[in-house]
Image: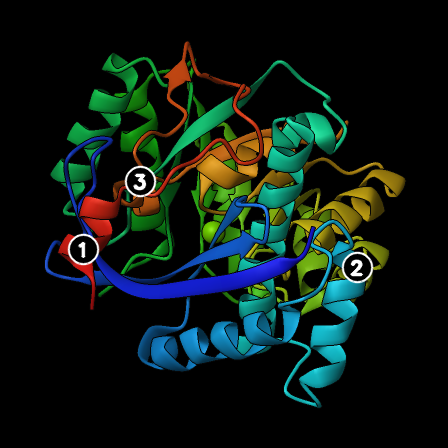
Amino acid sequence: MKLASLETDIVLLPNDEPLAGFSENPNAKNPIVTLRLRTDDGIEGLGVAYFGGALTRTLRQAIDALGALALGEDPLRIEAVARKLRDAAGSSGPGGILTMAMSAIDVALWDIKGKALGLPLWKLLGGGRDRIPTYASGALRRGLKLDEAVTAAGRLREKGYRQTKMQLGLPGITSPAREVEQARLIREACGPDMDLMCDINQRWRPEQAIDIGRRVEDAGVGLFWLEDVTTHDDYAGLARVTAALATPVAGGEYLWGIVPFRHMVEARSVDIVMIDQVRSGGITPWLKIAGMAEAFNLPVVSHGVPEIHIHLVGAVPNGLTVEYMPRLFALWKDVPQPVDGDLLMPTDPGLGLEFDQAAIDKYRA
Ligand SMILES: [Mg+2]
């Protein structure tokens, strides 16, 4: 079997919020590059890449150029293909556009492998679980009005979600008291039994994170984790926060490739390692990072695209929960749906996903 052809597209997906109904920015569009990578015996592997922003066309060109180099190669030899592409890319990596483009190709190759072997990806990768917890994400963003966020939290509870994530590091004039009050009101709305995560998206200084984090603890909010409390590569600053708080600290979605995770876990910067399959460079590096975290006695969680990450978090022994972020759902004919707060492992071979061609035609840039 050899790789025979590829096809990419750019789609601009609407920025709606289907879980609770309040979008922070309903007029925004999310640019996504889609990839179809085909073999000479008719198997099609799917991949996606995003985070390109104004450079999305450049990201697509990178996928086209690297994909062309992969043609003629054996799709089952994923490390050999990756090595060839990395070598050919000169010094354009290791992070950024190169890593994101490598991710789309790596995911498509794993999809091909699963289809060629007739196995769902999670089973091919280790097959750790039948089902995996999932948390509603993106529904309680900091840009919502407080009453919208509180209403949204109540809706998530009514819909049966057992875990969800809010955000602090509020926009505009804020104070520790306002931050704590936001957390308290959202906790009240989602109820005492919901696991409640809270994302700071790098907006605090380490000392602010310790101060507000302690106040949130004292208010009895009971966070499941506090995420990206400060600049992602301030490993020592993160470690100070992690040591100071009883609340688990999560981080890792902003790290590129494998090596930065070594620095993060060696410094004991986080209690929970979050891995993004696009920024890490695909499924292959994602699994290596998960293994590294396992060696440090740390659980791993995913960032974005639950339809792909379900296979990864569900495959490894230290997978904790899947972020249920529906941002790319419009692309697919069907996606995994939560059942009593869990996602059931897919049964179709490979990713078990199919592009919705009508959606691609509708949203094509
Ligand atoms: Mg985050």
Q: Relative to 299, is 267 on the left or the right?
A: right
Nearest the viewer among 186 and 60 is 60
From where the camera sits, is residue 29 visible? Answer: yes
| Residue identifier under label 2 | 79
Q: Relative to 327, is 206 on the left or the right?
A: right
**Please, which residue is most extreme toward the right here?**
295
| Residue identifier under label 3 | 329
Tell me which numbered mark, 2 or 3, is placed earlier along the sequence: 2
Beta carbon at label 3 within 8 Å of ligand 1: no
Q: Residue 361 carries which label?
A: 1
Above or below residue 331? Residue 259 is below
Say what amino acid the circle numbered 1 marks.
Answer: Asp
Query: Residue 313 appears at what percent x and percent y?
Result: 63, 33
Query: Residue 58 appears at what percent x and percent y?
Result: 41, 82
Tell me which numbered mark, 1 or 2, is placed earlier along the sequence: 2
Q: Give the quadrant of residue 207.
A: bottom right
Residue drawn at point x = 27 percent, y = 23 percent: 156
Q: Residues within 10 Å of mark 1 (few under 14, many from 20)?
A: few
Q: Relative to 194, is 185 on the left or the right?
A: left
Q: Quadrant of the C terminus?
A: bottom left
Q: Give the quadrant of residue 161.
A: top left
Query: Residue 151 appears at what percent x and percent y?
Result: 16, 29
Q: Give the quadrant of residue 320.
A: top right
Q: Can you tell which of label 2 and label 3 is closer to the viewer?
A: 2
Nearest the viewer among 280 and 81 is 81
Residue drawn at point x = 63 percent, y = 62 percent: 281
